[in-house]
Image (cartoon, helix red, strand yellow):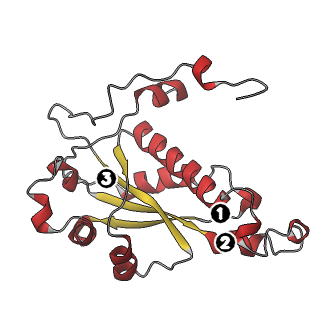
Amino acid sequence: MEFEEVVRARRMTRAFARTPVPETTVAQCIDLASRAPSAGKSQGWHLLMFTDDEVMQYWDIALPEPDRLRFAFPSLLNAPVIMLSLADTQAYLTRYSESDKQHTGLGDSLEAWPAPYWTIDASFSTMTLLHALHDHGVGSLFFAHAREQELRDAFSIPDSVQILGVIAAGYPEDSVPRPGRSAQRPRRTPDEIIHRLKW
């Protein structure tokens, strides 16, 4: 697909078939996503991935059985791949403590940073991954995680690692897609987005 087509056609998928996604396809998409910008090439983006039988280990914590009865998107649980998108803050302190970056002072503490580049960079990679999956014919959904402390405890996620959210990936179910509640909100035009000289 042409890049413009990928961007315009990509949508969040909320209903998945159980068909497995080849590991090579997922790996290719992650490789593309790893090429997104990264401050100082700190490369603090990580994915905690669940596939096949592992997927329910995630859902058992994030959406326990009793809560599934009233869940609005039950076919979301069919997604054969679940990935937690993570940002390692320590990677940035370590990188900016190295000799070529030490003069910036950004290796001293997270508070020294004017913006949370670990979050920014991991977000770049996450969005690139969503586009790459679409380009490979794989649907995806990025959604906010729930029960953060339970996820950290169950899967040994350190406190220094930020959880940005969750990516579900798989082939879309054949049924008519049910859009999210916000889908009909109008998209702002470039003129509404651009500010010149002042807000």
Marks 2 and 3, how far apart at CA: 30 Å
The kind of residue tagged 1 is: Gln
User: Tag on residue 21?
Assistant: 3
Q: Earlier in the sequence, mark 2 or mark 1?
A: 1
- Nearest the eye: 54 or 165: 165
Q: Viewed as shown, does residue 196 lie left or right of 160?
A: right
Residue 177 placed where, x, y %? 21, 33
User: Which residue appears at 75% of the width and 57% of the height?
Assistant: 114
Asked if labels 1 and 2 touch by Cβ distance under 8 angstroms, the answer is yes
Asked if labels 3 and 2 touch by Cβ distance under 8 angstroms, the answer is no
In the picture, the quarter occupied by the C terminus is: top right
The image shows residue 101, relative to residue 153, as above or below, that is above
Marks 1 and 3, how far apart at CA: 26 Å
Q: Which residue is mark 1?
A: 43
- Nearest the eye: 180 or 5: 180
Please identify, in this view, whether the residue under mark 1 or under mark 3 is nearer the observer.
1
Residue 63 placed where, x, y %? 21, 64
Q: Which residue is mark 2?
A: 91
